[in-house]
Image: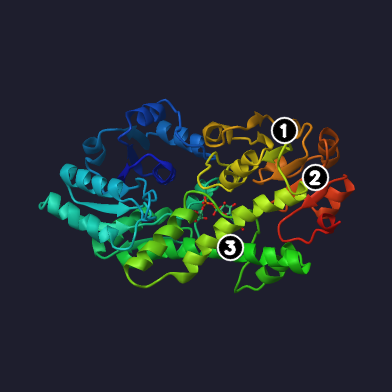
């Protein structure tokens, strides 16, 4: 199969690289000449484990290439994937579809042979039908079918998620669209991955519903965590006991400093907007959005309590500022709430993060950057574990305590047991755990 992938961003590059690894011929197109020039010399615009190797390998095998020339990329293509960004529109939280509709018009003008136009970007319900309308209007001769193929990739695990998904969702309403999509995903269906064929609107809805549900699950356990702290329960024990019920499942029940990233915050806001527009309020999702903001602010108070009520003049080491490990992405990361509150309250903040500095240097003014946890913790009054990078999961707590002024830790990912922290001389707080230390 020959496929043009429009948009060499996160979803476009991961999908393009993985589809080329299936043996399809993929041409990734982007309007940014700089991005394409970089990709053509093996320089990636994003970090994702394993992606660079996969791209290099498939470029060498002749299955993957990059260009700014849309018409050339589309020449003879069986399918054209739209994988451009759909950021939150400023002000109203709605997904900004400017890039999707611009891509639809560009595709319509360049379309010659028959093709399936397939949207991978996360788009509000009704967008795929509108893409079809735009293409037909721009080029009445165009011979095409529409498909919606939402992506469920997690940053940091995207290649594994693409190659071994729980399911593939394909919204398609014609035999030709279903046939082409079946051919594209044949390597997965051969491995018994379910390919679910649905209507266009259902496919669009599945993506929002799945992400909002997962955001709800995280937020639910975060709210239970707050209550656990008050009543003396341990949220890890509670989540374990809940998660063993097969109907609930243990995944996405880790209490922490609130969800962040490029998907959950954006998609929950977009779903809330879609509900409002259709007079079908998404009350649960709206509450999740508000509670998640409160969770992030609660982390600030936790650290303040640990420091005896004030940040002023205190030195704080922050371990991890990306929204999760194995990514350099800081979009909507809890650090963007926590660190400015520390700095604003008069703390001296020393940050360590394996990849966070590139974006963090601009987003987190007034902090200093350090190579590792021990360096960041020099002379500190408290260490805050904000992102559970492997580098921060197995620290030598005795050594860490020895470089600090007063050993104290806000373990906001519950990486360490309260007992091991106590044994190393730390006062500590976690999330959803009762802390007698702070009562004394
Ligand atoms: C998510 C979805 O998992 C993916 O299917 C979708 O396509 C895009 O959004 P991603 O944003 O990359 O992927 O990260 P994910 O691993 O899902 O984590 C999202 C956020 O939730 C992170 O901030 C993470 O720290 C937080 N989280 C996750 C928790 O706080 N607790 C959990 O139990 C799980």
* Image vertical order of residue 33 relative to residue 169, above or below: above
Viewer-proximal residue, 193 or 241? Answer: 241
Label 2: few (<14), some (14–19) or many (≥20) C-alpha neighbours in 10 Å:
many
* Residue at which label 3 appears: 219
**Where is 68 relative to 417, above or below?**
above
Q: CA gap, disc 2 to disc 3?
A: 26 Å
Crowd tier of the residue under label 1, counting other residues whose Cα lies within 10 Å: few below 14, some 14–19, many 20 or above: many
What's the CA distance linking mark 3 and mark 1?
Answer: 30 Å
**Dot 3: what SS?**
helix
Left or right, 301 with reference to 399: left
| Residue drawn at x 88%, y 45% as measured from the top left | 425
In the picture, measured across the screen, residue 48 lies left or right of residue 17, that is right
- Of labels 2 and 1, earlier in sequence is 1
Residue 72 horizontal/vertical position (percent): 23, 35
Q: Please indicate, yes or no, whether residue 294 appears anywhere in the rendered image.
A: yes
Q: Is residue 175 left or right of residue 236?
A: left
Q: Which residue is mark 1?
A: 376
Q: Which mark is residue 408?
A: 2
Q: Earlier in the sequence, mark 3 or mark 1?
A: 3
Q: Quadrant of residue 351?
A: top right
């Amino acid at each position: 199969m020959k496929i043009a992938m429009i948009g060499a961003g996160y979803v476009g590059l991961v999908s393009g690289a993985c589809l080329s690894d299936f043996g399809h011929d993929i041409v990734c197109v982007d309007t940014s000449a700089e991005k394409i020039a970089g990709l053509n010399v093996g320089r990636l615009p994003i970090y994702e484990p394993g992606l660079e190797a996969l791209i290099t390998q498939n470029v060498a095998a002749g299955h993957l290439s990059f260009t700014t020339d849309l018409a050339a990329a589309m020449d003879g293509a069986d399918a054209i994937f739209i994988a451009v960004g759909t950021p939150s529109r400023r002000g109203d939280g709605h997904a900004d579809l400017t890039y999707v509709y611009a891509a639809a018009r560009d595709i319509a003008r360049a379309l010659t042979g028959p093709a399936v136009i397939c949207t991978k970007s996360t788009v509000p319900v009704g967008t795929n039908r509108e893409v079809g309308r735009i293409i037909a209007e721009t080029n009445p001769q165009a011979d095409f079918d529409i498909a919606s193929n939402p992506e469920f990739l997690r940053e940091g695990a995207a290649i594994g998620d693409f190659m071994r998904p729980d399911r593939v969702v394909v919204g398609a309403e014609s035999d030709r669209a279903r046939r082409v999509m079946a051919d594209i995903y044949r390597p997965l269906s051969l491995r018994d991955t379910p390919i679910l064929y649905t209507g266009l609107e259902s496919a669009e809805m599945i993506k929002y519903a799945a992400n909002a549900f997962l955001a709800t699950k995280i937020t639910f356990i975060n709210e239970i965590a707050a209550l656990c702290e008050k009543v003396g329960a341990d949220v890890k024990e509670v989540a374990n006991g809940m998660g063993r019920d097969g109907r609930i499942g243990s995944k996405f029940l880790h209490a922490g400093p609130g969800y962040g990233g490029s998907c959950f915050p954006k998609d929950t806001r977009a779903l809330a907007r879609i509900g409002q527009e259709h007079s079908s309020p998404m009350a649960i999702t709206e509450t999740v959005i508000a509670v998640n903001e409160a969770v992030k602010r609660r982390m600030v108070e936790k650290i303040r309590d640990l420091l005896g009520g004030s940040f002023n003049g205190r030195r704080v080491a922050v371990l991890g500022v990306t929204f999760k490990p194995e990514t350099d992405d800081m979009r909507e990361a809890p650090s963007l709430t926590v660190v400015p509150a520390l700095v604003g309250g008069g703390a001296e903040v020393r940050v360590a993060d394996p990849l966070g500095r590139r974006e963090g240097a601009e987003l987190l003014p007034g902090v200093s950057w350090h190579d590792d946890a021990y360096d960041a913790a020099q002379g500190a009054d408290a260490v805050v574990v904000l992102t559970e990078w492997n580098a921060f999961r197995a620290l030598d707590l005795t050594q860490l305590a020895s470089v600090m002024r007063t050993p104290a830790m806000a373990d906001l990912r519950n990486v360490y047991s309260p007992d091991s922290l106590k044994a190393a001389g730390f006062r500590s707080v976690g999330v959803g755990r009762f802390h007698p230390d702070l009562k004394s």
